[in-house]
Amino acid sequence: MLSFIARRLGLLIPTFFGVTLLTFALIRMIPGDPVEVMMGERRVDPAMHAEALHRLGLDKPLYTQYFDYIGNLAQGDLGESLRTRESVWHEFTTLFPATLELSLAALLFAGTLGLIAGVIAALKRGSLFDHGVMGISLAGYSMPIFWWGLLLIMFFSVWLGWTPVSGRIDLLYDIEPRTGFMLIDTLLSDEEGAFVSALRHLILPAVVLGTIPLAVIARMTRSAMLEVLREDYVRTARAKGLSPARVVFIHGLRNALIPVLTVFGLQIGALLAGAVLTETIFSWPGIGKWLIESIGARDYPVVQNGILLIACLVILVNFIVDILYGLANPRIRHQR
Amino acid sequence: MTHSTTPEAVDQSLLYPSPLKEFWQAFAHNKGAVAGLLFMIGMIICALFAPWLAPYNPSEQFRDFLLTPPSWLEGGQMQFLLGTDELGRDMLSRLIHGARLSLMIGLASVLLSMLPGILLGLVAGFFPRLLGPSIMRLMDVMLALPSLLLAVAIVAILGPGLINTVVAIAIVSLPSYVRLTRAAVMSELNRDYVTASRLAGSGLLRLMFVTVLPNCMAPLIVQATLSFSSAILDAAALGFLGLGVQPPTPEWGTMLASARDYIERAWWVVTLPGLAILLSVLAINLMGDGLRDALDPKLKNAV
Amino acid sequence: MSLLNIKNLSVRFGDANAVPVVDGLDIEVNEGEVLAIVGESGSGKSVTMMALMGLIEAPGIVKADQLQFDGHDMLSLKGKQRRKIVGKDLSMVFQDPMTALNPSFTVGYQIEEVLQQHLGLKGKAARARALQLLERVEIPAAASRLDAYPHQLSGGMSQRVAIAMAIAAEPKLLIADEPTTALDVTIQAQIMELLLDLQREQNMALVLITHDLAVVAETAQRVCVMYAGQAVELGHVPMLFDSPKHPYTEALLKAIPEHSLGAKRLATLPGIVPGRFDRPHGCLLSPRCPYAQADCKAQRPDLVPHAHGAVRCFYPLNLNSEVA
């Protein structure tokens, strides 16, 4: 198992350097004069221009610039925001828990509902329920989630008044960020009703963000289950006199989970992309909203290294999924 | 000794349907796919004849009719079938012109990514020593970022606008073509017919484009429809984020972005553009499913 | 009373009018007896036993006048009651050991599962018993194999594990569905040997489904020859081999390579078993039968008992050459 992890880890390194090259190149592809673009004004005073160019390190040859960039990264220096003068790393770590909380809630929603719906659809193949699940999941898969979010806001927040429109919690609460997870922080604080308020804020964004993963997981679970239930070992399990629940959930689902897990992993990248849209709609103070606002404000250091951080996150998550995949599938684990 | 070869076999081969007919039969068997196709045809007609079909110029502002509800609602006007937006522009006209824009973005970005993608994939498949792996590593790097985020990053650098949207989406969907083509090429290269063609003295280019490529087309066509739908979705998302096509161009996502502020007063300005996006994406995905089943029976049970 | 008693079993797939895959089959197995069911692929051997185990799922339809095992009516038994018998007193070994074991669980787990389900053994007790079982089926280094995954075992090893699983709860009847077909020739004899050893040692009944008549001759006491879902001949072993009554049995015997020693060609029976949609009007064998007469093509014969068994043929062979 350890050598399996080591091998996968080895594959990460070239990808990581590739991504740094990409983010390095991105910022240098800005059309026009970088200093003018970054300062947002034309005809900058030549002395200031040269000074800015030097400060940004743009006056050196390209390869030196790249090595400087890597060197800074290695020292944990991701630059600072042009807007707030805060370090990019600091901003990222402050905002990231919000995105993580939202994503986990979305995955929880999509995973449980998708697995249950997929398994039942497979067991009742051809039934009304099966057709319903397949139809809804096809629609979910095609859903423009930014519109879906607006629709849900319109229905639940504007018409029914059940859920708040934006943010993570009502403004009247002042919650000290201990873990960064609002649900946990509100439980730790002794403010009454804060937890419920946080939960109410979380539900709609989580549903919106979870919609596409839900559709994909339900579809995948169904087809994987159908495939697995035809296998000989499921027949063996039934011939052993095991209960139907044990046959389906232990012998069937355990094997069906392997492809589902892969898809689940692929969805995590999509989830981060979805977070950008969801956070924008619900004014959720996470890294997605941060990135979009920085783009709007032409805050290039944030854009560049924010993207780098998100890419690293995706790589890391895929790595973890790979390991989990190995755990779930003994045949992969023992591969030489 | 009597063998069990049936004499009917000969007759059947005479009656064997042409590939096109066979394809159509398989496709038509899938009701959803046909529905998707019909919707797409409708959309293409809208796109082609937008200026004649749309009752008004999509940018014309009727200052006396701001946020008029659709005609069947109280306060609706017969002249504005689907109501008007916050500047008094006719929703129906904007939606019809939006179809034109969406299809154009989809088509352009698919072509712009498919052609280089196939070329890179062929090269990667034919040169598995050095060139292939380096191309694939590059694609891995591009895949490390979720597609929408990469598109956002590219647009952030190039600046918003129609052309840049197309470029960004094309770049983003490039890796899937490369991967798919390479995988198909690798598996075809081991087949005997390729060896035979090689022995017959075919040159590299002939092998690539005449011998191997046609046999890799089925999954590529399916991928093209799928990336067409995700191109429409991504373009709308970019528009919604304010990074895509800029107002007053009637792009569906851009329309949604400006409609956000009227969510409490005018549901139609929010609902209709999104519905248009959902239905067209759904239609293309349905068609894609049908195409996959009809073109590539091997994939039928895959997902 | 016999251990297993099947009367007029029929299995169909699809609606009630579909051509049955198994048709009007009677089978009886006594305690401690070895019965071989012989026939070509598609003759309904496996389906019969799957029906007994309750492994036929919709759209399959199982009907029988009697489907009695060890005093239980297996047709009317439902859910929990049935599962108390299946896997315990009545168990099965399947054809392809490489797919019959669940790839996600260790060998030990899959055996212990049976022990827990039927004998209530847990933890260390179950593990110890599983180890014993692996040793009993002659798996070398059994202790280390408990934690192996099926993909780490060879086909023969996997089949031994499957057998260990099947005998874990000391069944009264073990069904072995072509247990050696998927294995290397060198392993086949070992596995058969093991099965017969276990059969004798535990005095369990064994139903051996096979198309290898050579194996049948060495192992079984009685034989049921099936063709296209019907029993065409029932008989005891030496007699059936010495004087087959049914033309199909005769053809099968002739196809054993040893019987053709000296001949230029191995005798074969032309054609294939009729499928669901091309059933002949008369006797199901008539298109392939070298002795077929006009009435064979018009009517279907019944299974008629004779002194030492039963045969389904209008013109049975060797009836007069009966050895006492």
Image (cartoon, coloured by chain):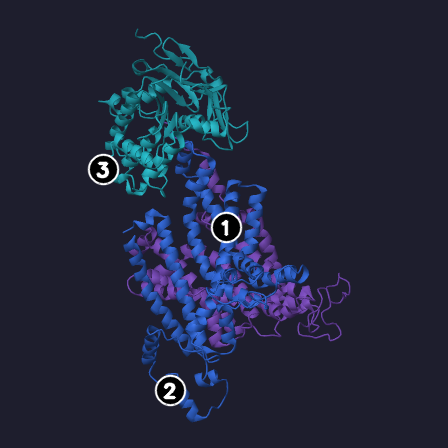
Label 2 chain ID = A
Q: Is residue C12 visible?
A: yes
Are tags 1 and 2 found on a single chain? yes
* Residue lying at 49% horizontally and 46% vertically, measured from the top left: A222
Q: Could you tell me if the residues under marks 1 and 2 are in contact, i.e. CB atoms within 8 Å? A: no
Q: Give whichever of B125, A42 is nearer the camera.
A: A42
**Numbered disc in front, either 1 or 2:** 1
Q: Provide the residue designation for mark 3.
A: C141
Give the drawing colour for chain A: blue
Horizontal side of C72 relative to C241 (left or right) equals: right
x, y percentage for residue C109?
A: 35, 39
State the separation of the CA atoms marked 1 and 2: 53 Å
Q: Residues within 10 Å of mark 1 (few under 14, many from 20)?
A: some
Q: Provide the residue designation for mark 2.
A: A54
**Image height of C319 relative to A61, above or below:** above
x, y percentage for residue B1?
A: 35, 27
Q: Provide the residue designation for mark 1.
A: A112
Q: Give SS at disc 1.
A: helix
Q: Give SS at disc 3.
A: loop
State the separation of the CA atoms marked 3 and 2: 71 Å
* Residue lying at 37% horizontally and 62% vertically, measured from the top left: B122
Label 1 chain ID = A
State which chain is coloured cyan: C
- Amino acid type of the residue tagged 1 in the rendering: Thr
- Amino acid type of the residue tagged 3 in the rendering: Ala
- Amino acid type of the residue tagged 2 in the rendering: His
State which chain is coloured purple: B
